[in-house]
């Protein structure tokens, strides 16, 4: 029997796991996919919001501001990509100025530091490609950008090395109470736990509603995105939001931590919790809206488009904490934007709730530091030369668009909770994330995965399950 | 730092031909840098025949064609480094490369020939809506899996784009036991060679649907089907024309993009139409002593012309080195065009640097029938050639002779026109 089972290895589940690993407790994360960071956490705007947007007094506002403040130190500790590049909310219309002012005041009440309303001249100085129609902006210097895979994987790895178990391809089917806890039925048998953390993202309503009479409903709210080539890096320096106004809620244009430009999202409510397909209508809407705040957006430089689903709860508020009628069942539900920004705060908060509930003692062996995959591009020539001499795999480039070496891919596969699929390698190393979108490197990465995992190449998948990349050998059916 | 008179970036057909030609022109201190484990480039996976008709008057396979040029390099004992990735080139022609054995290698070059080839346009760049499951491959990636590794990427195939690799893969997949259901092409004409449409589609009863595109991809883990629709003359899908195809694989053959990240990094000016370097008659880029040839310069249909072009670049690089690597003054008479061509290679000409003749290559923007290609030097028509049919998928060329140029000693205008007479 575990002390705690966490359902879901997205950023929220992994954050809870990581902060729980500070205590002496047996913790297991169950995840229906083959890897961490496979749902909402992998397909979003990758923004660490300042915290001015969420309505004052809400849990969203509190968690956002608290999470935002945790990022700089956490990025140091866990070695993931984070840049406090600052955000601008651009007002396109004099009539909308009161809304900008209201946003500023809301942010101040939320405790966001450094907020300022800036005029057109200063805005243009900060962002030369801003639309000439922009009249003013809210400047939030504490806004940031993050690699969402990097963050989630870092949290998971650190939790794992501090003793948290992870079970992948394990889908929770039902929850039943038992005398001193819960029985978690999965496709791989039952697991017993004293406490359950519901970090199931889009499916959090399913589990919540199994144990609570106070029903919640999570709507998958699809957001389509376009990612532009790294040659567009520097088109904007800050994250550019559109002030929701008479043109509706706009889309953002932002640099990513890897130097691409991201444009998105749309907001389309759908039924299917796996409906991560982009649509022509969605992409067209996106491209049309994206040009509003900036001039000359190089949209022809798109290298990929994708869609993510926000776990939108009807009340648009985070639902965090123990369900009163289900002792030992802790919700982390309705975690939509600013969920990524709030993840560290939610993790810390929920871990502390569980500590108090179970009377957990500190884990004396806890080590909060984690080292990411070595990035040879950050080494000096001498250091890199020495590295290749010691480990020649760092001298063999596999992904030429992103200059990813075999050494990095081997590290991604061999490290704790290592990659098992092409997408797993991609999220950890960026191999296949560049402008050719894995056309060149995928056969080579498949070869390395097969060799390292001791399986035939025909077993290698894009993302686990039935996503096999090859279906057999030539001539076998002739 | 090591020094070579000429360093060739890429050991595919362009790089090999450039190296041999530079050597034969008297500059023997040549090095080829190749990122793959063998020389030959993309030809190694092109196991079909039809290569070399112009050069060798034979129908060779890709590897056979490559081997003829590899033999030339071996005979001349031109050194090459395999499994070596060029990471960066400076405008001062200092090359940084990397491999397992030597780690970081820095090489100073007297002249450089860019011969990096091209890459395929990806699903992402096409912005095709739908899911992102396994089973979506560019045609060239599928070709590598099938021909070099012996793996089948799928069994029920739809192909988007009728570029030559897509056409070749339609036949290849069929021969390997897959069912190719349809080839959809966005444009009202094929992007591939006529002979490939006949030999790879018609001979196997594979339908080609022109003015069609993929509007949806189904399947959450592996491709389960695609929807194709007819497009209007602006390329927009026409509602109501959707057709569903069950398949496990979507192959994309929707255009090739010259791979110029290194060129851009060193500051070489690019032509926005070709996405390749802007070059003069010597195939010299905006940086003196840096030359370009083959698919990195502009995408070719036939390797024979890659070899021919690259040999010219190799000779020009050798001439640059032989002249002491000084940046000679080039007149830049622009090659202008009207009535059909979208670009020309070269883009500028200095007659003083032209030998016996100069081939100017171009592509037209649409299918054109019963037209004349006319070349005017200072307004005087010097070439008048009837072309029964021209298409974007087939590169055109005109040859300016020394005599034509000599007849215009004060030449200031060169224009290629496609005209009705």
Image (cartoon, coloured by chain):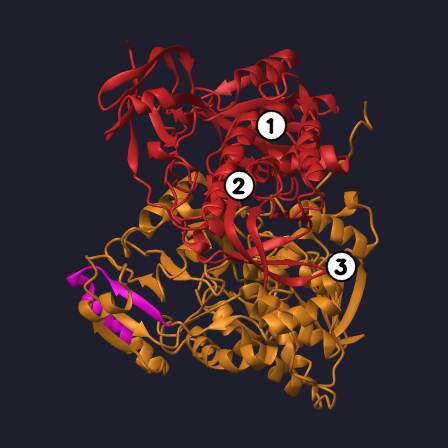
Chain colours: A orange, B red
Q: Earlier in the sequence, mark 1 or mark 2?
A: 2
Question: Does A208 lie within the magenta span?
Answer: no
Q: Taking B54 as reference, is B290 left or right? A: left
Label 3 SS: strand
Please tell me whether residue A160 is drawn above or below residue B5 in the rendered image. Answer: below
Distance of label 2 from label 3 (alpha carbons): 38 Å
Dot 3 falls on which chain? Answer: A
Q: Nearer the viewer, residue A193 or A473?
A: A473
Q: Taking B391 as reference, is A376 left or right? A: right
Q: Mark 1 — residue? A: B158
Please tell me whether residue A386 is drawn above or below residue B356 in the rendered image. Answer: below
Magenta range: A86-104
Classify mark 3: residues with Cα within 10 Å, few (<14), some (14-19) or many (20+): some
Classify mark 1: residues with Cα within 10 Å, few (<14), some (14-19) or many (20+): many
Q: Mark 3 — residue? A: A186
Indicate which label's residue lies in the foreground, 1 or 2: 2
Question: Does A99 lie within the magenta span?
Answer: yes
Q: Please name the residue shown 22% across and 59% down the image.
A: A92
As drawn, the label of residue B122 is 2
> Quarter of the image holding residue B345?
top left
x, y percentage for residue A419? 70, 60
Label 1 SS: strand
Q: Please name the residue shown 45% across and 52% down the image.
A: A229
Classify mark 2: residues with Cα within 10 Å, few (<14), some (14-19) or many (20+): many
Dot 2 falls on which chain? Answer: B
**Residues flagged by tags 3 and 1 on a common chain:** no
**Residues flagged by tags 1 and 2 on a common chain:** yes
> Quarter of the image holding residue A32?
bottom right
| Any part of residue A471 in sight | yes
Label 2 SS: loop
x, y percentage for residue B316? 47, 39
């Amino acid at each position: 029997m575990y002390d705690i089972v966490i359902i879901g290895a997205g950023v929220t589940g992994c954050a809870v796991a990581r902060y729980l690993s500070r205590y002496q407790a047996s913790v297991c994360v169950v995840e229906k996919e083959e890897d961490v960071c496979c749902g909402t956490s992998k397909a979003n705007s990758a923004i660490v919001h300042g915290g001015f947007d969420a309505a004052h007094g809400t849990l969203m506002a509190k968690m956002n501001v608290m999470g935002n403040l945790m990022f700089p130190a956490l990025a140091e500790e866990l070695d993931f990509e984070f840049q406090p590049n600052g955000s601008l909310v651009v007002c396109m219309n004099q009539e909308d100025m009161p809304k900008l002012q209201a946003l500023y005041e809301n942010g101040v009440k939320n405790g966001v530091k450094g907020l300022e309303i800036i005029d057109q001249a200063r805005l243009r100085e900060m962002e030369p490609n801003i639309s000439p129609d922009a009249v003013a902006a809210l400047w939030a210097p504490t806004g940031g950008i993050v690699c969402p895979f990097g963050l989630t994987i870092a949290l998971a790895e650190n939790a794992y090395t501090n003793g948290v178990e992870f079970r992948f391809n394990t889908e929770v089917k039902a929850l039943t109470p038992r005398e001193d806890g819960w029985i978690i039925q999965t496709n791989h048998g039952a697991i017993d736990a004293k406490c359950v953390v519901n970090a199931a993202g889009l499916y959090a309503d399913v589990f919540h509603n199994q144990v609570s009479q106070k029903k919640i409903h999570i709507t998958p709210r699809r957001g389509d995105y376009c990612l532009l080539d790294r040659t567009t890096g520097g088109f904007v320096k800050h994250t550019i939001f559109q002030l929701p106004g008479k043109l509706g809620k706009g889309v953002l244009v932002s640099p990513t931590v890897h130097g691409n430009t991201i444009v998105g999202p749309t907001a389309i409510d759908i039924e299917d919790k796996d409906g991560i397909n982009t649509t022509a209508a969605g992409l067209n809407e996106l491209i049309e809206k994206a040009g509003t705040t900036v001039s000359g957006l190089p949209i022809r430089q798109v290298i990929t488009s994708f869609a993510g689903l926000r776990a939108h709860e009807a009340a648009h508020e985070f639902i965090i904490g123990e369900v009163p009628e289900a002792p030992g069942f802790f919700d982390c539900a309705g975690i939509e934007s600013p969920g990524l920004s709030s993840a560290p705060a939610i993790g810390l908060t929920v871990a502390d709730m569980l500590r108090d509930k179970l009377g957990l003692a500190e884990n004396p062996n806890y080590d909060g530091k984690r080292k990411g995959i070595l990035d040879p591009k950050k080494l000096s020539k001498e250091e890199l030369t020495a590295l290749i001499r010691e480990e020649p795999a760092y001298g063999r480039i596999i992904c030429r668009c992103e200059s990813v070496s075999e050494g990095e891919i081997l590290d991604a596969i061999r490290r704790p909770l290592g990659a098992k699929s092409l997408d797993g390698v991609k999220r950890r190393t960026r191999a296949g994330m560049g402008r050719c979108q894995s056309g060149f490197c995928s056969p080579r990465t498949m070869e390395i995965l097969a060799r390292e995992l001791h399986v035939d190449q025909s077993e290698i998948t894009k993302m686990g399950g039935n996503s096999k990349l090859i279906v057999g050998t030539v001539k076998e059916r002739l | 730092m090591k020094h070579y008179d000429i360093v060739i970036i890429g050991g595919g057909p362009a790089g090999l031909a450039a190296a041999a030609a530079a050597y034969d022109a008297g500059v023997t201190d040549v090095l080829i840098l190749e990122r793959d484990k063998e020389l030959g480039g993309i030809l190694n996976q092109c196991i079909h025949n039809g290569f070399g008709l112009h050069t060798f008057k034979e129908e060779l396979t890709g590897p056979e064609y490559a081997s003829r040029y590899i033999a030339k390099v071996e005979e001349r004992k031109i050194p090459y480094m395999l499994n070596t990735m060029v990471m960066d080139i400076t405008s001062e022609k200092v090359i940084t490369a990397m491999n397992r054995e030597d780690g970081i290698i820095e090489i100073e070059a007297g002249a450089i020939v860019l011969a990096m080839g091209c890459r395929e346009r990806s699903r992402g760049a096409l912005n095709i809506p739908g899911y992102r499951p396994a089973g979506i491959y560019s045609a060239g990636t599928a070709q590598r899996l099938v021909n070099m590794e012996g793996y089948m990427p799928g069994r029920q195939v739809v192909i988007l784009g009728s570029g030559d690799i897509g056409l070749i893969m339609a036949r290849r997949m069929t021969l390997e036991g897959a069912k190719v259901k349809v080839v959809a092409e966005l444009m009202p004409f094929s992007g591939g060679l006529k002979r490939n449409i006949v030999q790879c589609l018609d001979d196997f009863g594979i339908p080609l649907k022109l003015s069609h595109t993929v509007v949806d991809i189904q399947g959450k883990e592996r491709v389960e089907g695609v929807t194709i629709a007819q497009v209007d003359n602006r390329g927009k899908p026409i509602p109501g024309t959707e057709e569903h195809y069950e398949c496990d694989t979507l192959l994309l053959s929707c255009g090739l993009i010259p791979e110029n990240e290194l060129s851009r990094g060193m500051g070489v000016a690019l032509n926005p139409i070709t996405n390749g370097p802007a070059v003069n008659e010597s195939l010299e880029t905006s940086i003196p002593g840096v030359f370009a040839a083959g698919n990195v310069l502009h995408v070719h249909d036939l390797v024979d012309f890659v070899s021919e072009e690259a040999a010219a670049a190799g000779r020009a690089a050798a001439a640059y080195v032989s002249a002491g690597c000084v940046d000679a003054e080039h007149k830049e008479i622009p090659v202008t065009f009207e009535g059909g061509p979208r670009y020309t290679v070269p883009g500028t000409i200095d007659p003083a640097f032209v030998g016996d003749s100069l081939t100017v290559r171009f592509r037209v923007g649409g299918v054109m029938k019963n037209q004349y290609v006319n070349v005017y030097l200072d307004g005087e028509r010097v070439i008048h050639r009837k072309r029964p049919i021209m298409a974007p998928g087939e590169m055109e060329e005109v040859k300016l002779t020394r005599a034509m140029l000599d007849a215009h000693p004060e030449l200031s205008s060169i224009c290629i026109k496609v005209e009705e007479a």
